C-alpha cells in the first residue's frame, strides 16, 4: 500500500502561489499584524513550505483529482482539426475580402484620376474595382 501523495516538484510553484494568496487575505493579514515583531507572516510562510507534503496528504483526494485532470488536459490538449473547416472559412471570408479589395482599388483609381496621373493605371484600377 502506498502512503499519502507527496507534492510533485512541478506543483511546487502552484503551491507557493496558492500559499501567497491565502496569506494575503484580509483575515489572515489582520491576524498576522497582531505580531509585534512582524515576523509571523514569514514564519508561517516558511512553516507551510516545510510542511508541503503534510498539507498535500491532508487534501490527498483533491490533489489526486487535480493530477488526473492535469494529466488528461496535457494528453488531450492537441486535437486534430475537424474535417471541412477550410471550405466554410473560405465561404465566410471571401465576400468581405473581395468587397474590401474592390473598394481599395476604386479609391486608389479615383485618387489617381483626381491627381491627373497620366497613363492607364488610374483607369485600370477603377475598372478592376
Image (spheres, rainbow, N blue to C red):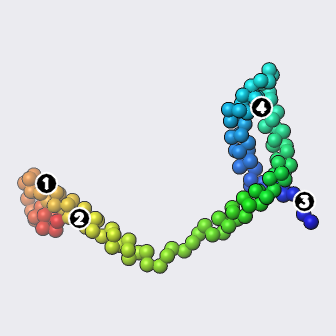
Q: Which mark is residue 19?
A: none
| SS assignment at label 4 | helix
Pick whichever, 12 or 111, lies toward us: 12
**Foreground label between 3 and 1:** 3
Q: Position of residue 68 (x, y in %)?
A: 72, 64
**Labelled pair 3, 4 in contact (Cβ < 8 Å):** no
Quadrant assignment, res 120? bottom left
| Marks 1 and 2, the one that precedes in the sequence | 2
Q: Which residue is mark 1?
A: 111
Q: Residues within 10 Å of mark 1 (few under 14, many from 20)?
A: some
**Foreground label between 2 and 3:** 3
Pick whichever, 40 or 34, lies toward us: 34
Q: Which residue is mark 4?
A: 41
On screen, 50 above or below 57?
above
Q: Which residue is mark 3?
A: 3
**Labelled pair 2, 4 in contact (Cβ < 8 Å):** no
On screen, 95 above or below 46?
below
Q: Which residue is mark 2?
A: 99
Amino acid at each position: 500500500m502506498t502512503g499519502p501523495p507527496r507534492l510533485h516538484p512541478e506543483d511546487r510553484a502552484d503551491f507557493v502561489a496558492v500559499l501567497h494568496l491565502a496569506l494575503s487575505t484580509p483575515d489572515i493579514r489582520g491576524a498576522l499584524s497582531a505580531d509585534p515583531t512582524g515576523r509571523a507572516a514569514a514564519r508561517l510562510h516558511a512553516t507551510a513550505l516545510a510542511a508541503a507534503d503534510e498539507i498535500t496528504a491532508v487534501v490527498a483526494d483533491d490533489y489526486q483529482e487535480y493530477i488526473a485532470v492535469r494529466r488528461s488536459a496535457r494528453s488531450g490538449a492537441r486535437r486534430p482539426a475537424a474535417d471541412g473547416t477550410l471550405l466554410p472559412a473560405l465561404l465566410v471570408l471571401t465576400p468581405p475580402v473581395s468587397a474590401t479589395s474592390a473598394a481599395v482599388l476604386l479609391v486608389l483609381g479615383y485618387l489617381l484620376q483626381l491627381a491627373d496621373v497620366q497613363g492607364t493605371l488610374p483607369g485600370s484600377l477603377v475598372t478592376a474595382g
